[in-house]
Image (spheres, grey):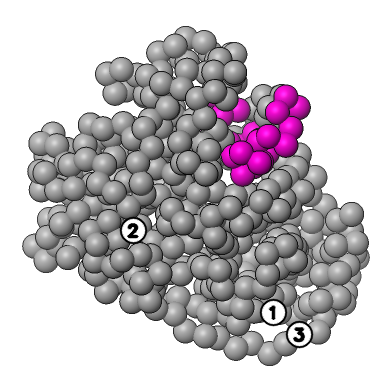
Amino acid sequence: MNIIAVDIGTSRIKTACFDETGRMSRLLSQRLDRAASPEIQDAEQWFDASALLLKQLTADPSVSPDAVVLTGNMHALLGIDAGGKPVAPAVLWSDNSAQAESDGLNDRYGRTLPERFGNRSIPVFSLPKILRMKRLSPDLYRRTATFMQSKDYIAFRLTGNRVTEPTDASGVLGMDLCTHSWAKDFFDDLQIDSAKLPAIVPSASVCGHVTGEAAVRTGLPQGIPVIAGTGDLASAAVGSSVDPETVSLTLGTAGQLLAAGKKGAGSKLAGQLFIFAHADPEQELYLGSVPSGGFSFEWLAGLHNISVPDFFELADRVPLSENLPIFMPYILGKGAPSMDYTPCGAWRNLRAAHTLAHLCRGAVFGTLCPLRQCADLLEKVSGRRANLILQALACREKAVRETTCALFGQRKFIPENSEASLLGAAMVGAVAFKLYPDLGAAAAVMVKKRQISVPANPVAQSLFERFLAFAE
């Protein structure tokens, strides 16, 4: 069976074809223009880029798709009118302008939010953005027939159906984590029309079929099924074989530590780590994050007029030592576990003898420290995870890989396929078509990884303890 997976990133759209063994062929991608604003994006561009890539993919006679499955960036604000047109550009997850609305939700509902929905409100969630739209742009709110996430908009353009699924819905704030349904009473209390929210269907389910119009635009066969899929956090977790024994660490724009547990088991983590729905309805997804993540490296490189590859080349020159400057990577806020999104980055232990290379290595170390904090919290509350999967920059760049291995005590693995979100989406598609009974069985076949061994570095723990002291 050939499953085409599409990943709607904020910087790049990707698509690839997978078979039931996890073999990926014909990976294609297109960068998106974010020059106008890093926090808004034209949703039409998402579909135009997706359609172009699908057209190129299906032009290959060796690609004969049986289904399409979707994943994409979460927490967006995208209103679609009754005719199917966006009422305004999509406001991306990184926008935190709804701080007042987010604070108001926390003040008004207190512990009810994490107890019922898994999380306190933060300004990057969709609900505070909806409240802000209603307050400042009531005409846009009135014109909106449906609020959608990125992958759900692509599903709509492919099938004509307005649906979402639990992983993305849990990132809006207002989906009951127990029932996987919208909390109508909650939205009524906020005077938000819950009819503007799409129906929630299971992640591994068919949400529609490719229409004739979409077939012309994309080259996909008319009538093939489209799988609802998952938000990118959930697909990355699935594609990294995250389970109760395994966590994954990713450095993209943000830094993320992903873990999973039995549904309802993470109640003690609520308000400290993020809790979202999992693609497996019997599990839940835990997220620790540092918002700047890999963005910190781009930021520092830009300040010194060097390229990102130059940044990593410089970082590789400097070993971990007691004299390393310590970077507090909070230039976009702290994220988990403090749940504070007020920018407050800093350097500590900075000396005149330090060079740009020291700063680069210090930035790598400091950016990983909050994720180690999240791993320690996870272990304290819900038990140790024996395995750590390194994804993205964490496995590609030497300085990041070595620092991760020095900071984390678990067995480390590197995946053969680093496109975790695309692979995870394909696995969801395989389960939807009952090629595997569940995601665990799919992971046993479709996720391939190798263990790596890096010598222990005793300096890392003392530097981490110094970071914690500075962070207090």
Q: Nearer the viewer, mark 2 or mark 3?
A: 2
- Counting from the top left corner in percent of width and height, residue 469 is at 90, 61
Residue linked to disc 3: 457
Q: Is residue 346 visible?
A: yes
Specify which label sits upstream in the sequence, 1 or 3. Answer: 1
Quarter placement of the C terminus:
bottom right
Label 2 is placed on what type of residue? Val
Label 1 is placed on what type of residue? Gly
Residue linked to disc 1: 409
Residue at (50, 78) in percent of width and height: 414
On whether residue 18 falls in the magenta region, the answer is no
Q: Determine crowd level at label 1: few under 14, some 14-19, many 20+ residues with C-alpha closer than 10 A.
A: some
Mark pair 1, 2: CA separation: 30 Å
Q: Nearer the viewer, mark 1 or mark 2?
A: 2
Specify which label sits upstream in the sequence, 1 or 2. Answer: 1
Residues shaded magenta: 107-130
Residue at (38, 24) in percent of width and height: 146
- Counting from the top left corner in percent of width and height, residue 35 is at 50, 38
Q: Quadrant of residue 313?
A: bottom right
User: Would residue 442 be found to the left or right of residue 190 on screen?
Assistant: left
Residue linked to disc 2: 428
- Counting from the top left corner in percent of width and height, residue 53 is at 25, 50
Q: Determine crowd level at label 3: few under 14, some 14-19, many 20+ residues with C-alpha closer than 10 A.
A: some
Q: Is residue 254 visible?
A: no
Label 3 is placed on what type of residue? Asn
User: Would residue 123 be found to the left or right of residue 41 on screen?
Assistant: right
Whether label 2 touches label 3, CB < 8 Å: no
On whether residue 109 falls in the magenta region, the answer is yes
Q: Quadrant of residue 188?
A: top right
Q: Determine crowd level at label 2: few under 14, some 14-19, many 20+ residues with C-alpha closer than 10 A.
A: many
